[in-house]
């Protein structure tokens, strides 16, 4: 097989997907070519169109085909509540699981100076202008409880406090249906610290 054959290029292109290594990419390529060419063509068309047309919402930075996403454009949402998340996928998770009716702000990551991710890369200037210019009463931090997530949350909380905005954090602890012996010590400590009346 030639080094730059189309099959090798297809296999190599599929490896850009998370969790897809060389063997998985090869299996996917062979499956599409041998059993589902129509599906492969549809995937290629939709993928090309999505890469061309999907961008970031100018207000919250989530992924959308429009200048402003459907959530930000919905006048029924509570504009006084803004939930800060790290990735657009977390907006989808909250929308599917919670009864949250506020708006969002998507960071696109966490502060990590060693990786070259600072406030500018996370769009924190846009968030700060929303806090300054809009009637945001509460900023809900839904960032990961990692070291970088905690630093990011503290940085955002300090900025929000300077604008008189209340800052809260989503609860953390033992997952629903989880067994205590399976939960790590840090999560268990957070669960105890965040306990409330029964």
Image (tube, rainbow, N blue to C red):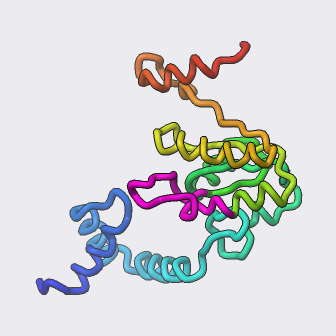
Residue 76: image location, x then y, percent = 88, 56
Residue under the point 26% across and 72% down: 30
Residue nearer the viewer, 43 or 62: 62
Residue drawn at 33 percent across, 71 percent down: 14
Residue 190 located left or right of residue 136: left
**Secondary structure mostly taken by the magenta-highlighted segment of the chain:** loop
User: Vertical placement of 195 versus 113: above or below?
Assistant: above
Q: Position of residue 90 (x, y in %)?
A: 59, 51
The quadrant of the picture occupied by the C terminus is: top right
**Quadrant holding the N terminus:** bottom left
Q: Is residue 33 magenta?
A: no
Q: Is residue 115 magenta?
A: yes
Residue positioned most to the left: 1
Chain part drawn in magenta: 107-125
Q: Quadrant of residue 138?
A: top right
Percent position of residue 82, x then y: 75, 50
The vertical placement of 5 against 130, above or below, is below
Camera-side residue of 191 and 168: 168
């Amino acid at each position: 097989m030639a080094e730059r054959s189309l099959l090798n290029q297809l296999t190599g292109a599929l490896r850009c997907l998370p969790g897809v290594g060389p063997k998985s990419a090869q299996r996917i390529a062979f499956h599409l070519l041998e059993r589902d060419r129509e599906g492969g063509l549809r995937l290629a068309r939709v993928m090309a169109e999505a890469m061309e047309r999907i961008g970031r919402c100018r207000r919250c930075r989530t992924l959308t085909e429009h200048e402003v996403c459907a959530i930000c454009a919905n006048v029924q949402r509570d504009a006084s509540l803004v939930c800060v998340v790290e990735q657009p996928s977390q907006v989808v998770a909250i929308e599917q699981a919670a009864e949250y009716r506020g708006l969002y702000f998507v960071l696109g990551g966490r502060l990590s100076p060693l990786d070259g991710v600072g406030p500018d890369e996370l769009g924190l200037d846009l968030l700060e202008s929303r806090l300054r210019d809009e009637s945001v009463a509460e900023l809900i931090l839904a960032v990961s409880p990692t070291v970088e997530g905690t630093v990011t949350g503290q940085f955002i909380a300090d900025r929000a406090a300077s604008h008189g905005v209340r800052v809260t954090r989503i609860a953390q602890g033992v997952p629903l249906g989880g067994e205590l012996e399976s939960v790590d010590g840090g999560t268990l400590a957070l669960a105890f610290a965040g306990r409330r009346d029964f």
